[in-house]
Amino acid sequence: MTNFNRFEAFELDVLKEVGNIGAGNAATALSTLLNKPVDMSVPSVRLMPFEEIAERVGGSEQVVVAVFLRVEGDVPSNMFFIIQEEYAQQLMKQLIPLQHVDDGIYSEMELSVLCEIGNILAGSYLSSLADFTKLAMMPSVPIVAHDMAGAILSYGIMHYGQMGDSALLIETKFIEDCNTIEGQFFLIPDPDSFQKIFQALGVGSP
């Protein structure tokens, strides 16, 4: 935990600014896709140990919808966009003209819609981070899953043994009309990638 305690507010402010720019780009893309106004905000950014991610989204047995992408390039990383089931259903009801049956079962089309939203979010954030750092970051084709948080995170560990032990959490809020829906976005750089990111940002390393 020492490394996290050394992290300064200024450094988090830099990452929050990157997140805000990414959220703005994502809101524009979503508004175009859905043909309706959508605002997004980034209320908080923080670093956390990888093992705390499941607790952050409600516990390892909490059923969530998650979009996973592998990032290749100068700073290989893993990305998860995780949204709790109740918010995922609200998001579709508000943004997509589909009649969702509240039985915990998603149709292929509904999962495809959630996957595309996660893909837009991840792509917008990566684009902003790449602009700030001048580092190459190429996302893979996204994968969407509806399962317990612990199972989804284990999938990433099993497929990418080099996954780092620190995660950058960006909490995001979708705002459409008077409704607010929360989602959590995790960037988990491979070992050594975090140092490259912070060196490129000119703010040292955690």
Image (cartoon, rainbow, N blue to C red):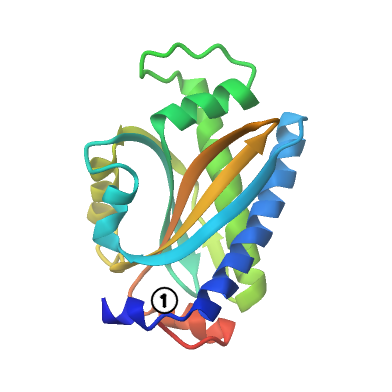
Residue 89 locus on image (x, y percent): 48, 24
Left or right of residue 34, residue 115 in this image: left
Q: Nearer the viewer, residue 146 or 169?
A: 169
**Residue 77 position by quadrant:** bottom left
Residue 70 locus on image (x, y percent): 43, 56
The answer to whether residue 188 is above or below residue 9 is above
Report the number of discs.
1
Name the residue furthest front.
178
Q: Residues within 10 Å of mark 1 (few under 14, many from 20)?
A: some
**Residue of label 1:** 193
Q: Amino acid at mark 1?
A: Ser
Looking at the image, which residue is at 51% across and 37% down? 115
Q: Nearer the viewer, residue 171 or 104?
A: 171
The answer to whether residue 180 is above or below residue 71 is above
Looking at the image, which residue is at 42% across and 14% down? 102
Quarter of the image with the N terminus is: bottom left
Quarter of the image with the C terminus is: bottom left
Residue 184 locus on image (x, y percent): 45, 48
The answer to whether residue 168 is above or below residue 108 is below
**Residue 16 position by quadrant:** bottom right
Q: Identify the secondary structure beneath mark 1.
A: helix
Left or right of residue 143, residue 131 in this image: right
The answer to whether residue 170 is above or below residue 85 is below
Residue 140 locus on image (x, y percent): 49, 53
Looking at the image, which residue is at 51% across and 86% down? 199
Looking at the image, which residue is at 55% across and 61% down? 138
